[in-house]
Image: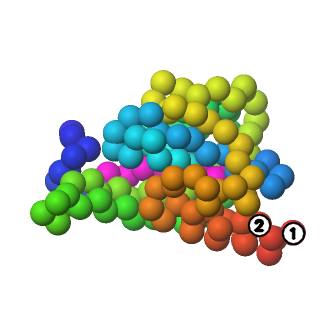
Amino acid sequence: MSRRYPKHPLVGIGALIFQRDRILMVERGKQPLKGYWSLPGGLVETGETLHEAVQREVLEETGLRVQPVQFFEYFERIMPDARGRAEYHYLLMDYVCKVEGGTLVPGSDVARAEWVLRKDLRALLITQGTLEVIERAYRARRRRT
């Protein structure tokens, strides 16, 4: 099934992975959104649970093994073409995850994987809506502590 002009929205996952005052971000190395920074993540494969998908995608993109700790929220991304038709349509399930092992190294579909200070996020070219999700997650972390 093509990601472009899908018949139905595609289900994906994203990982909110914190290390003190930093969050793990990846720079997309392929289209769509090549050159944009986002949370590690990707599409859920048939027969795969959301937890399995987030673990697989984070490992593939960053070299890190993670454990999903908590579902955070869902995010809907609709990217229209020049005519206004939905060229891409994703339903993204974001999970707070903790690192359990591995070595940070960018995978084949990302250009870079880095721990980014919260204060430096606004300087990055970030996918639409991602910064708002991250800020909500930071606020939720602060309320829990």
Residue farthest front in this picture = 123
Point out residue 62 in the picture as x, y percentages from the top left corner: 61, 32
Q: Using the rendered image of the protein, determine whether residue 47 is visible from the camera's viewpoint.
A: no
Q: Secondary structure at mark 2?
A: helix
Instruction: Return the mark for residue 141.
Output: 2
Residue 128 image-quadrant placement:
bottom left
- Front residue (pair 50, 106): 106
In the displayed structure, does residue 22 sit left or right of residue 73? right
Residue type, mark 2 in image: Arg
- Where the C terminus falls, by quadrant? bottom right
Instruction: Return the mark for residue 145.
Output: 1
Magenta residue span: 10-18
In the displayed structure, does residue 62 sit left or right of residue 140? left
Say which residue appears at 34% left-offset and 39% top-offset.
31
Main secondary structure found in the magenta portion: strand
Inspect the magenta stretch and tell me whether residue 13 lies in it.
yes
CA distance separating discs 2 and 1: 6 Å
Residue type, mark 1 in image: Thr
Point out residue 132 in the picture as x, y percentages from the top left corner: 57, 68
Say which residue appears at 53% left-offset and 40% top-offset.
27
Instruction: Return the mark for residue 49.
Output: none
- Callout 1 environment at 10 Å: few (<14), some (14 to 19), or many (20+)? few
